[in-house]
Amino acid sequence: MFSMNISSILGEFSIRQNTTILPEKRPKIDFSRRKTAENMDLLEGFDPNIELQTSHGIHHLYNFMNSANFFSRFIRNFDNFKETDFLFVCCRYVLTQIEKFTRGVPDHFEILAFRKDDIIYIGCDRSMITRKVLTEQSKLSIFSGLKFGKCLTTGDWSNLTDTHSIIRHIRIINHQTNSAHSVICSSTVRAFDNNSEPIEIHVKRDRKSFQHCIREWSFGARLSGSSKIIFGIRNENYKITKISETRSIRTDHSSALNMISEVLTMIAKLIENEKCVAVKPNFETQDMEFEKVDISYMNKSEQW
């Protein structure tokens, strides 16, 4: 996502591994009230000709949260899979960069994101918009949904059910520091299963880079909240010769430790042919809650 700071972008689980004595009265942080919607340009400050993301004044989300003591450090350095200092960055109307690993060598790709009123909106891969002319339709598609950008700029969420974009609003509460954070994730999904859960579907012809693609697809599914990924291999005649399925991270009341362990196990299976070894790290936990937030208030055109 890839970023191992998964807890900042996925939701609906709680961490209660350590017993902590908390104050009887906690300041309640209300995220249900938002400022009046403003007309804003999603591409403000974005110059496709600028190659260096530092030219866009990136704000480092992971370091920010770490310096604020919001999260303890979940992931340690371990054999052949090192947590880098540049894990996940997010800023207002600018490019972000996420570290991923291909055959043990660091590689990079960029996603778009912006931050407003303490809410982080996560967008799509920059490669989707590396074109000379950006149409109005492509501008709306930048944030991974044909209507997601329009909803943000107009505050009108009435037609949200008509789009294939998945919106998730996650509230993260740290009871030790009496602080909270709100994150909205969006991503385009390809289909829904019988339980109306989103599915990412991918097919590729080249077997050589297939493992690399699975990792990248898995990262995209984490952003969208898809419960599983279906991927296949097709031959020269476009006939699918193999179909496999892998589940993305479950976010329904499972603990963060089990979630991260599942991720590491999946990574180990995906990269075992690349002579990389993933081992379970040591964890430190805090008393936190990750809750799904009711976004019904966003249906009002005056607030979001």
Image: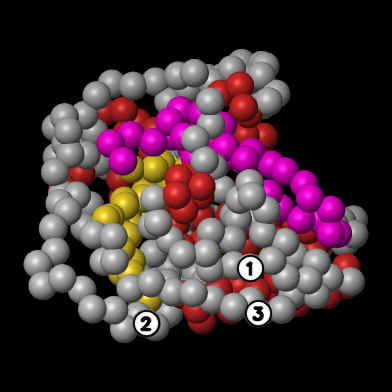
Q: Name the residue under label 2.
A: 18
Against 281, is 125 above or below? above
Determine the secondary structure under disc 3.
loop
Identified by mark 3, the residue type is Lys
At a point 62% along the width and 34% down the height, the residue shown is 126
Against 7, is 159 above or below? above
Residue 41 image position (x, y, % from top left): 39, 20
**Residues rendered magenta in the picture:** 90-118
Residue 57 or residue 205, whichever sits in front? 57
Identified by mark 2, the residue type is Asn
Residue 109 colored in magenta in the image: yes
Q: Main secondary structure of the magenta part?
A: strand
In this rendering, which labeled residue sits more in front, label 2 or label 3?
A: 2
Determine the secondary structure under disc 2.
loop
Give the alpha-carbon distance from disc 2 to disc 3, as whole Å. 19 Å
Q: In this view, does 107 lie to the left or right of 249?
A: right
Q: Name the residue under label 1.
A: 76
Give the alpha-carbon distance from disc 1 to disc 3, as whole Å. 9 Å
